[in-house]
Amino acid sequence: MIDYCNKVALAPMVRFGELPSRLLALHLGADLVWGPEIIDRKLVDCVRTKNDSLGTTDFVHPKAGVVFRTCPFEKKRLIFQIGTASPDIAVQAAKIVASDVAQIDVNAGCPKHFSYHGGMGAALLKTPDLLEEILRSLVTDVGRPFQLPISVKIRVLSSVEETVDLVERLCKTGISCLTLHSRFVQQNPTSSAIPNREVYLEAVAKACAAHGVACYANGSIQDKAEGLSVISQYGTTGAMIGHSASHDLSVFDSSTVPWMTQVRSFLELARAYENSPPNTKYCVLRLIPGKDPLRQIMTRMKSHDEMLSLVESA
């Protein structure tokens, strides 16, 4: 089981949260890593495959190829996030990855169109009965048989009272951890967290603690030091860093690691684990400062070898 206390984690991020990012985050001091949201309907069509040449476990879709890749190094610290609107499909999907992860998390906070209009993500905040049913099913049919913690990530609602009422309901489903993203559903990831986040965090942390559920804080946390400060000030169990980590993974380190060093390490991991080159380039372009001339040249690179050669010659 996971030790949640005083931990600072990498937040779930679509596109950025693939294996190279997670591994580099762990190497640079992240205590836990959330993978990117994977939709349950896609996962149930995947075949779990041992990739002996890479030393990984791959979940391969017949049309989309590798949907998710993991390795033993991260297993005990990897939280797998599912996008779902169905208790039955969520359970089917979770069982496929249950032997390879440390926790199953339900995304109940993503406001993106695809998730929301599919009844997933933040849409679940408007259907709390369904969200409860999903979590109970996962706890009963996956959590207990596989001895795996089940968790949920939500956003704040219009009032503290409404948010706490929902948290109370969710804690009674048997979950082990709840993450509160301190933004309203309509806010994008780059906007500031709500100005009174401390009121929400203190109230939600207290509600979670009463049920023996870990509470993680997310939203506008810039680095590990601030994450630990949030834990200390507001009584949460842990904290989570998203946006700032996607531009500098050394936010988990006590000292700043030069961006060029991070980019080189990222590219080496990406090549070693055969990450998708377009995804690698997307992530690397986030790590390179916007005004650096290398950034523009990097946009023209197509392979890992080309990207590494460019960095080595810079």
Image (spheres, grey):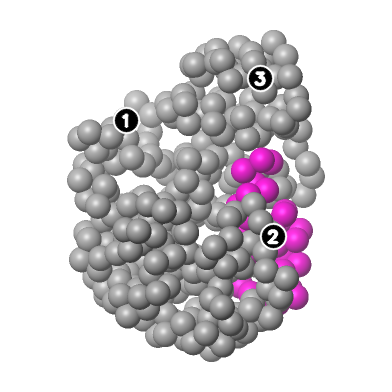
Question: What residue is shown with label 2?
Answer: 192
Mark 1 vs mark 2, foreground winner is 2
- Relative to 262, say whether 112 is above or below: below
Magenta highlight on residue 241: yes
SS assignment at label 3: helix
Q: Which of labels 3 and 1 is toward the front?
A: 3
Location of residue 83 by image quarter:
bottom left
Dot 3 or dot 1: first in sequence order is 1
Estimate the spatial distance between the alpha carbons at disc 1 and disc 2, rounded to whole Å. Answer: 44 Å
**Considering the image in quadrants, where does the N terminus appear?**
bottom left
Q: Amino acid at mark 1?
A: Asp
* Magenta residues, start to end: 221-248
- Residue 287 position in % (x across, y down): 66, 34
Which residue is label 1 attached to? Answer: 52
Q: Is residue 53 left or right of residue 269?
A: left
Q: Give the spatial CA distance, label 3 vs label 1.
A: 36 Å
Horizontal side of 62 relative to 265 (left or right) equals left
Q: Earlier in the sequence, mark 3 or mark 2?
A: 2
